[in-house]
Amino acid sequence: MSGCMVGWAHSKFGKHEGRDIESLIVEVTEAALADAGVGAADIDTIYLGTMNGGFVRQEFPASLVFQANPGFRFKPATRIENACATGSAAIHQGLNAIAAGRARLALVVGVEKMTEVSGAKVGDILLGASYRKEEDAIEGGFAGIFGQIAQSYFQRYGDQSDALARIAAKNHKNGAANPLAQMQKDLGYEFCRTVSDKNPIVAGPLKRTDCSLVSDGAAAVVLADTATALSMKKAVIFRAAEQVNDFLPMSRRDVIAFEGPALAWQQALAKARVSLDDLDLVETHDCFTIAELIEYEAMGLTPKGEGARAILEGWTEKDGRLPVNPSGGLKSKGHPIGATGVSMHVLAAMQVTGQAGGIQVPGAALAGVMNMGGAAVANFVSILEPLRA
């Protein structure tokens, strides 16, 4: 799959009172075009990623991108949804259009505004990314789904509460240096490890600090074919962009094996002709700390059941063998569903171009991104590097 990111933008994630999805879309669209040095008239096609499902009343949002610039009028614009992997799915559609020769430049925007509805409503909307026929009665919304996954993992491999707290503490420490993050506070291991009034049990063994944040936010990228990208001021190429989907019902698979993420990683590394050891960092989908733990195994960092080693021995710290989520991840940065996949690609692109500021991994030149929809159902892995050294 050919294609490069030649411009990007990222709103601050958090609770944006008084703003709607239109204003978030317009903000990142204008900024991404300016960053790429292109105009709306130069864009051939537009993909807008948002899950919605009832977070906001406004549906049919693809043409809201046009509110940023009348030069977009009459361009094709399409809304994409693939649960928590919506942003990466939208990027893939842009890459597909470029690979097919249907576009030279594509604009991809990811957006979500989750904070207009109650916590109970958020939980119910997110359960729409589960198999309702069998999983609708699980208590705790999507946290309940991953609470069950954590419980099953603990039953098979032993209590991993120390490792989960270390992951939470790592990501909050990283996020404290990220000005785009929703929560810029280093909570420390002891707080994350201890059940308290401020850190209660949410579902199964998962505490509040094990769960990503309900967020508003948007991110955007301008994609270009390689020939066009060579003439741009900056370009990050997709060495690989792989998608693997699995069965939706958890009952049809070993849900703690994360077979879909593992296969997506295998395919992406093979396509890019690199090994995991070649990567300088990974931005991975830590919707819950147990997800990041199992993703260590899925990417091949440790054997199955030994993911805890990666965090307990410091491998995935910012100064470790393979920094994971130097941005703070979904845990600290926030998780506005449709924006997340685009955000992860933007932050990885910033890293490999040396533009990540306080969260920069020194010398980063090759990055992996793993964005997951549902409980390891829709799995996207990208391998990114600068087009020009």
Image (tube, helix red, strand yellow):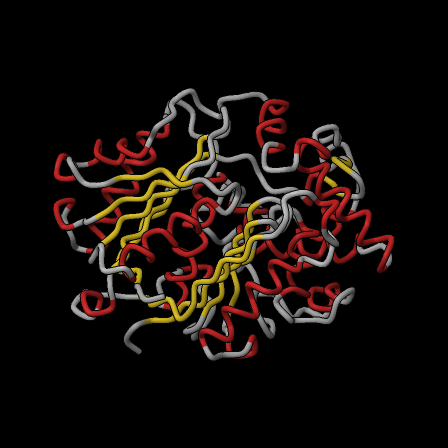
Where residue 176 appears, as percent x and y from the top left, is: 53, 50
In this view of the protein, can residue 293 be seen by the observer?
no
Quadrant in the picture for the C terminus: bottom left
For the point 43% across and 43% down, the residue is: 339
Left or right position of 172 against 92? right
In this picture, residue 138 sits left or right of residue 72: right
Q: Position of residue 372 (x, y in %)?
A: 56, 51
The answer to whether 323 is drawn above or below residue 73 in the figure is below
* Residue positioned 61% across, 67% down in the render: 299
- Residue drawn at 44 percent across, 51 percent down: 88
Instruction: Return the residue nearer the eye: 248 or 325.
Output: 248
Of the pair 144 and 326, the residue shown nearer to us: 144
**Residue 235 visible from this viewpoint:** yes
Horizontal placement of 277 versus 101: left or right? right
Question: Looking at the picture, does residue 219 appear above or below residue 314?
Answer: above
Expressed as whole percent of the image width and height from the top left, the position of residue 59 reads: 38, 25
